[in-house]
Image (spheres, helix red, strand yellow):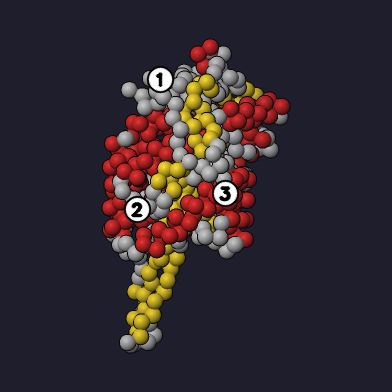
């Protein structure tokens, strides 16, 4: 039975308690598959709410940082167990709030479970090194200390995995956290926080404040008691967040946009390449920062690849993510739908040739949702908006080239450098791609989207502030090195 039969109002989670916003205001979270359905009502918080959360986190930090890594890890293990038990409920919230299919949402939720368990184990790893001293009667070593209060600003496209892969390392390394989720997925965030509450996390260690980014996100970045900010979102907002944090001397981590290319070499397994291009570009309705956007194909196999691609794109079934058989859900919001449609129009206006999709579906059963057909363009030139700007929707741009060298040069012709992939059987082409591709994640014979939780993740150029998330690399952001010199 669905957990969403009755419309519910959710609150902020501050200092271990669920509290209404001081503003007294709420707003509705809408199901993008059916704009008439309210998933839940969430707080529209103000500065007073944020100040209370930061104060709670600051007070809790004094005790939390004194726990051993093993003790902190036990709380994460418990949270993982609760989240696993409630995985279907949390996944349903995600599907109803942002539209991805239930199997994808369930997979993301279970990834959140795995991330929690991974970082729980990190509590038992070393936090420093012994360094030889020039003084024979001295001991010198390093240790790592937490930043203090960490602010997490999370997006709507991965409302379980991204908040957890930011909060879990922050917590295990001794920080306390104030999380501002995307307002579009605040119900999902609340359900994740219920799991932490059930796990018995001490009051004030993890706090949730829901509200507009222009209010809560900005105030979090500017708050003098927040020692670090980790942000995932658009480049425009990320730059503002980074500038605000830099201005007061705190630490920041920004993961932003991508315009991710896949290269199809003449010797590629075309069936595998088509499968990876469709999965990387169109799953989750293209709403991934690592989603495939530019498809760069050697001319010798261009027509064969295009024919196979279009044949499979035509078979994609749009529908409510909670319905069995739906392969692609709606855009996450009406605003995102309008953005995607505006880029499709730019493609037309700039002279690209539409091969598939390009419109809203005409099915009556999809009329109340924010659906757009999977879209494929060819005749796309490097200067066009659909070749340069992040669309964050199910739009593929096909671009033919005459060689692997030209393909890599075209792939690098972007302000972004998040992920990239190549399909080839040639070892030399693989090595050239690995060496020359200017992206933080490069994948061979695999789609651009996706990274394993134990591996560092982050981009180059405008895609990132050049730090890395996930895996053991996370310790670099969430701690500071302290050098200790002991004289006998």
Q: Position of residue 104 (x, y in %)?
A: 40, 31
Q: Secondary structure at mark 1?
A: loop
Q: CA distance from mark 1 to mark 3?
A: 40 Å
Between 156 and 353, the one lying in front of the other is: 156
Between 152 and 201, the one lying in front of the other is: 201
Q: How many marks?
A: 3
Is 208 on the left-hand or right-hand side of 360?
left
**Pointer 1 and pointer 3: residues touching (CB < 8 Å)?**
no
Nearer-N-terminus badge (1/3): 3
Quarter holding residue 397: top right
Q: Residues within 10 Å of mark 3 (few under 14, many from 20)?
A: some
Q: Position of residue 149 (x, y in %)?
A: 46, 58
Nearer-N-terminus badge (2/1): 2
Above or below, 227 against 419 in this view is below
Please state which of the two labelled residues, at mark 1 or mark 3, is closer to the viewer: 3
Q: Residue at x 38, y 69 (%)?
A: 143
Q: Which residue is mark 1?
A: 323
Q: CA distance from mark 2 to mark 1?
A: 39 Å
Q: Secondary structure at mark 2?
A: loop
Q: Which residue is mark 3?
A: 47
Is 140 on the left-hand or right-hand side of 413?
left
Please state which of the two labelled residues, at mark 2 or mark 1, is closer to the viewer: 2
Q: Residues within 10 Å of mark 2 (few under 14, many from 20)?
A: some
Q: Quadrant of the N terminus?
A: top left
Above or below, 116 against 243 in this view is above
Q: CA distance from mark 3 to mark 2?
A: 24 Å
Quarter holding residue 325: top left
Q: Position of residue 126 (x, y in %)?
A: 32, 64
Q: Which residue is mark 2?
A: 202
Q: Secondary structure at mark 3?
A: helix
Quarter holding residue 7: top left
């Amino acid at each position: 039975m669905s957990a969403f039969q009755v419309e519910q109002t959710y609150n902020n989670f501050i200092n271990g308690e669920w509290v209404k916003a001081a503003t007294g205001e709420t707003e509705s979270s809408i199901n993008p598959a059916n704009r008439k359905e309210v998933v839940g009502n969430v707080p529209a918080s103000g500065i007073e709410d944020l100040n209370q959360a930061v104060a709670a986190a600051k007070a809790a930090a004094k005790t939390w940082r004194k726990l051993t890594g093993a003790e902190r890890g036990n709380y994460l293990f418990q949270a993982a167990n609760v989240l696993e038990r409630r995985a279907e409920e949390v996944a349903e919230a995600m599907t109803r709030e942002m539209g991805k299919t239930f199997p994808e949402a369930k997979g993301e939720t279970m990834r959140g479970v795995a991330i929690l368990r991974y970082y729980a184990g990190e509590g038992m790893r070393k936090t420093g090194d012994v360094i030889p001293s020039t003084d024979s009667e001295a001991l010198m070593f390093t240790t790592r200390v937490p930043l203090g209060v960490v602010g997490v600003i999370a997006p709507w496209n991965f409302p379980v995995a991204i908040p957890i892969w930011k909060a879990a390392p922050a917590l295990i390394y001794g920080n306390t956290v104030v999380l501002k989720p995307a307002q579009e997925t605040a119900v999902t965030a609340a359900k994740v926080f219920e799991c932490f509450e059930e796990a018995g996390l001490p009051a004030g260690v993890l706090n949730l404040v829901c509200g507009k980014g222009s209010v809560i996100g900005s105030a979090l970045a500017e708050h003098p008691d927040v020692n670090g900010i980790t942000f995932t979102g658009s480049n425009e907002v990320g730059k503002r967040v980074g500038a605000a944090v830099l201005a007061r001397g705190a630490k920041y981590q920004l993961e932003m946009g991508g315009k991710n290319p896949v290269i199809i070499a003449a010797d590629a397994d075309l069936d595998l390449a088509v499968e990876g291009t469709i999965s990387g570009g169109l799953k989750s309705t293209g709403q991934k920062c690592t989603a495939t956007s530019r498809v760069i194909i050697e001319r010798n196999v261009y027509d064969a690849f295009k024919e196979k691609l279009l044949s499979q794109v035509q078979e994609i079934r749009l529908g409510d993510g909670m319905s069995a058989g739906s392969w692609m859900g709606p855009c996450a919001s009406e605003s995102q739908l309008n953005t995607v449609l505006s880029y499709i129009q730019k493609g037309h206006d700039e002279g690209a040739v539409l091969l598939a999709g390009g419109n809203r579906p005409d099915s009556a059963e999809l009329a109340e949702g924010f659906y757009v057909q999977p879209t494929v363009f060819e005749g796309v030139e490097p200067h066009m908006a659909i070749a340069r700007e992040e669309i964050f929707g199910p739009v593929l741009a096909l671009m033919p080239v005459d060689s692997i060298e030209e393909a890599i040069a075209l792939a690098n012709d972007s302000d972004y450098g998040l992920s990239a992939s190549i399909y080839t059987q040639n070892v030399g082409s693989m090595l050239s791609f690995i060496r020359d591709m200017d992206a933080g994640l490069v994948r061979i014979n695999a789609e651009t989207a996706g990274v394993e939780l134990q591996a560092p993740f982050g981009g180059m150029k405008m895609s990132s502030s050049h730090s890395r998330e996930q895996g053991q690399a996370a310790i670099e952001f969430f701690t500071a090195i302290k050098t200790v010199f002991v004289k006998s």
